[in-house]
């Protein structure tokens, strides 16, 4: 009977201690990345290469998704706004929704699924095939040579991808509102210009995506580096990257929104 | 033996002095002492899980002993700080069990990797050095291939070319013969011997391929359960009366090393048969 009561408590304690331990570990890992970032910034071609794999290769999925999200916003926005006779405000609605929330959040979710999971799998497999050990034995620090360039590539790529998502989303809203439904083009753009503030909306959105970039890339490289060096271990780490990233993006978004707007 | 008790001469490039090591509760090395003379090719043999690879990891400073000292050229590896450890590794080459080539880099970039990381040489000179190293392992002309396009034996030779890229004083080989066909195995064994003689490198080879190793090495240590059970020159080992050496050399199932895992229950008990006695 006592065992029946103690067992879940023990499990809860174990899970809590483990979570705190991992939080401490990931913080120390971030400090190590920052400490050994000199090489990835001095030899910037290492980082450029990773920007290509993480950022440039994600452009297609981000741009196409942005277009569809913008078109859906156009349809739904027009539907709702026209009930209140405010269909003219469609441009402002589309732009504000994208710049403040949808652009940074959805681009980050897409980035974590497309590039974050690939980073985790690549670093995890490098660990499983002793490539990280080989590097370390050759007196090359794997955090400086493998992890830091990927981390900075993610941090740099994320705001740019979010900006592309926003631009394509606004274009999608324009296609639906102006080209398909026939709203006045001048009204669409002028409403947007009047209601969108550069600092309050655009810059805050970019700050958000920068924070998501740091969080998503840190999770991706950490999970890869910490993966159990087996096929099952790398697979589990990749899944953890996508799930943890999604939860962290949404939680951080809530906190940032509460402070910013 | 090269080392008996604590009498150690400066001719020894590597020394293990009463070294113990454990992964958590599981002991791997148990008060082991041995010495590797400068410029010699020495094999450390033993079954899987006998602690051979752990010894290489202690020499390269990837792990630290729980007791005792591992000396490289007279310096205790565990006492080295980060910079000193990396300096020590720069003078060392290691061939991993399956090569551990960087899969995103071509053969040329793999071999050039340590040169680019540790020197400021011009690209044209790095290119020439890579060609020379690849020629030494008989793979000139493969520069543009990716690791996925190489056979197991070729990948191991490219990894060997990468390991000797900076002309190391010390070479560590972790199971260099595993998974190779007889021809590749012979080629790798010949290369290891040739490189040791040509470069004057001190080489340590961890392996369980007895017969091929005895053809090329200068000295052998047999390790079992974290302790040295036999040692000697290949001729001495071949003539050794030790039942342990005999069992290992001829791959016998019965002897000092048991084939069966020491299960806590009997086979009859596991199968649910009555009257089962623990065997």
Image (cartoon, grey):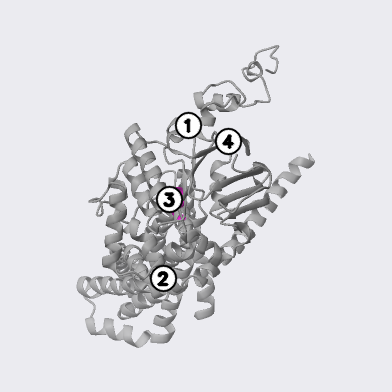
Task: Point out the residue furthest to the top here.
Answer: B275
- Mark 1 or 4, which is nearer the eye? 4
Mark 1: secondary structure = helix
Q: CA distance from mark 2 to mark 3?
A: 21 Å
The span picked out in magenta is: A127-132
Residue A200 % position (x, y): 44, 84
**Drawn side of residue B198 relative to residue B25, left or right:** left
Q: Nearer the viewer, residue B245 or B86?
A: B245
- Mark 1 or 2, which is nearer the eye? 1
Q: CA distance from mark 1 to mark 4?
A: 13 Å
Q: Chain of mark 4?
A: B
Give yes or no for residue A193 being in the magenta stretch. Answer: no
**Drawn side of residue B161 relative to residue B56, left or right:** left
Residue A174 in view here: yes
**Residue that badge 4 annotates:** B231
Q: Nearer the viewer, residue B275 or A148?
A: A148
Q: Residue at x 23, y 81 (%)?
A: A184
Up/down of B117 relative to A85, above or below:
above
Q: Do tag 4 and tag 3 residues touch (Cβ < 8 Å)?
A: no
Q: Nearer the viewer, residue A172 or B143?
A: B143
Up/down of B10 relative to A259, above or below:
above
Q: Chain of mark 2?
A: A
Residue B237 % position (x, y): 53, 30
**Residue that badge 2 annotates:** A40
**Residue that badge 1 annotates:** B210
Q: CA distance from mark 1 to mark 2?
A: 45 Å
Residue A227 % position (x, y): 50, 52
**Residue that badge 3 annotates:** A125
Whether callout 2 and callout 4 share a subunit is answered no
């Amino acid at each position: 009977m006592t065992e029946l009561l103690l067992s879940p408590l023990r499990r809860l304690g174990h899970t809590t201690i483990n979570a705190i331990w991992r939080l401490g570990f990931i913080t120390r890992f971030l400090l190590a990345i920052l400490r050994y970032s000199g090489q990835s910034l001095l030899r910037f071609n290492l980082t450029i290469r990773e920007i290509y794999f993480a950022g440039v290769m994600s452009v297609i999925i981000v741009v196409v998704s942005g277009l569809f999200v913008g078109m859906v916003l156009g349809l739904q926005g027009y539907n709702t706004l026209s009930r209140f006779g405010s269909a003219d405000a469609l441009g402002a609605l589309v732009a504000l929704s994208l710049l403040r929330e949808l652009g940074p959040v959805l681009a980050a979710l897409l980035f974590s699924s497309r590039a974050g999971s690939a980073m985790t799998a690549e670093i995890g497999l490098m660990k499983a095939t002793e490539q990280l050990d080989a590097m370390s034995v050759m007196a090359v620090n794997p955090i400086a040579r493998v992890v830091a360039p990927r981390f900075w590539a993610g941090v740099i790529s994320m705001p740019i991808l979010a900006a592309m998502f926003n631009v394509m989303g606004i274009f999608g809203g324009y296609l639906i509102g102006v080209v398909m439904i026939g709203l006045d083009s001048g009204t669409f753009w002028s409403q947007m210009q009047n209601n969108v503030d550069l600092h309050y909306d655009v810059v805050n959105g970019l700050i958000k995506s920068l924070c998501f970039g740091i969080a998503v890339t840190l999770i991706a490289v950490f999970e890869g580096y910490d993966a159990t060096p087996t096929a099952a271990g790398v697979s589990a780490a990749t899944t953890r990257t996508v799930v943890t990233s999604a939860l962290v993006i949404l939680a951080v978004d809530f906190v940032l929104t509460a402070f910013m707007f | 033996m090269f080392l008996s008790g604590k009498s150690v001469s400066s001719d020894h490039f590597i020394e293990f002095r009463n070294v113990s090591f454990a992964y958590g509760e599981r002991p791997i090395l148990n008060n082991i002492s041995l010495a590797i003379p400068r410029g010699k090719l020495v094999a450390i043999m033993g079954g899987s899980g006998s602690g051979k690879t752990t010894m290489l990891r202690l020499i390269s400073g990837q792990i630290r002993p729980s007791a005792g000292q591992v000396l490289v050229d007279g310096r205790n590896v565990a006492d080295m700080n980060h910079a000193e450890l990396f300096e020590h590794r720069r003078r060392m080459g290691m061939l991993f069990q399956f090569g551990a080539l960087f899969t995103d880099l071509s053969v040329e970039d793999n071999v050039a990797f340590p040169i680019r990381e540790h020197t400021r040489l011009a690209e044209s000179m790095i290119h020439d050095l890579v060609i020379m190293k690849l020629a030494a392992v008989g793979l000139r002309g493969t520069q543009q291939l990716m690791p996925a396009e190489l056979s197991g034996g070729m990948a191991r030779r490219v990894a060997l070319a990468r390991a000797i890229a900076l002309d190391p004083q010390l070479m560590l080989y972790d199971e260099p013969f595993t998974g190779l066909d007889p021809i590749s195995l012979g080629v790798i064994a010949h290369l290891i011997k040739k490189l040791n003689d040509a470069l004057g490198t001190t080489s340590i080879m961890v392996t369980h391929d007895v017969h091929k190793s005895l053809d090329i090495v200068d000295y052998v240590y047999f390790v079992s359960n974290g302790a040295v059970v036999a040692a000697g020159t290949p001729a001495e080992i071949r003539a050794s009366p030790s039942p342990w050496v005999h069992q290992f050399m001829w791959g016998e199932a019965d002897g000092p090393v048991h084939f069966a895992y020491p299960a806590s229950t009997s086979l009859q008990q596991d199968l649910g048969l009555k009257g089962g006695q623990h065997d």
